[in-house]
Amino acid sequence: MRRIRWGLLLAGGLLGMGAAASEVRFEGVVTRVTDGDTVWVRPAAEGGGGRRKPVKVRLLGLDAPERCQAHGSEAGAALAARVQDRHVTVRRRATDEYGRAVGTLWLGHDDVGAWLVSEGHAWSARYHGDPGPYADEEGRARAARRGLFAQTRPELPRDFRRRHGPC
């Protein structure tokens, strides 16, 4: 997770403290995929066909390569192929310091984050020794050498950003 405010983390139960009372769900259509872990979702119109402004959503629990990093464009393309122009459900848990909604993205009954990690397009987010919510999916992707895990030493996005800055 990138710099999500602590108060929101704690209030949202993101540190393994159970389901979040503050979770907000909404349905909509993915209008744009920015990169391997960020999408724009236009919420479904409420009561009568009015259009609503798209919401930028950072996927929770994973970290995809930066666009300019090895496998970055492939991760973004895979996410786009999976969700672009599709009806999804967002389970919003917090807002980060950049104003993005942070949450999970569901395509029907499928957790898109779990799918991204299992296909080798992202890492399970690690935090203070915790392997993250998608550790099992990452382990299987590594064992199968899928996606970015086919590389000899794939570099974590946070390490890449420290060395090179953002794209």
Image (cartoon, rainbow, N blue to C red):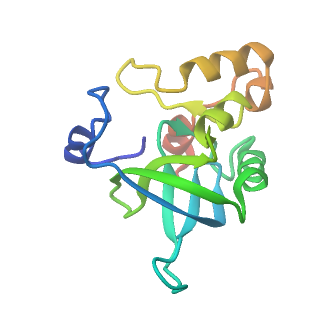
Quarter in which the C terminus is drawn: bottom right
Residue 80, percent from left and from top: 74, 56
Report the residue at 46% width, 80% height from top: 47
Quarter in which the N terminus is drawn: top left
Report the residue at 64% width, 42% height from top: 65
Residue 29, percent from left and from top: 62, 66
Q: Is residue 22 left or right of residue 116?
A: left
Residue 19, percent from left and from top: 31, 34
Report the residue at 63% width, 22% height from top: 138
Query: Residue 64 sits in which quadrant?
Result: top right
Query: In the picture shown, does residue 143 fall above or below 106?
Result: above
- Of residue 155 and residue 61, the one placed in the foreground of this image is 61
Query: Residue 101 sits in which quadrant?
Result: bottom left
How many discs mark residues in the rendered view?
0
Query: In the picture shown, does residue 166 fall above or below 7?
Result: below
**Residue 167 visible in the current orientation:** no
Q: Is residue 150 left or right of residue 30?
A: right
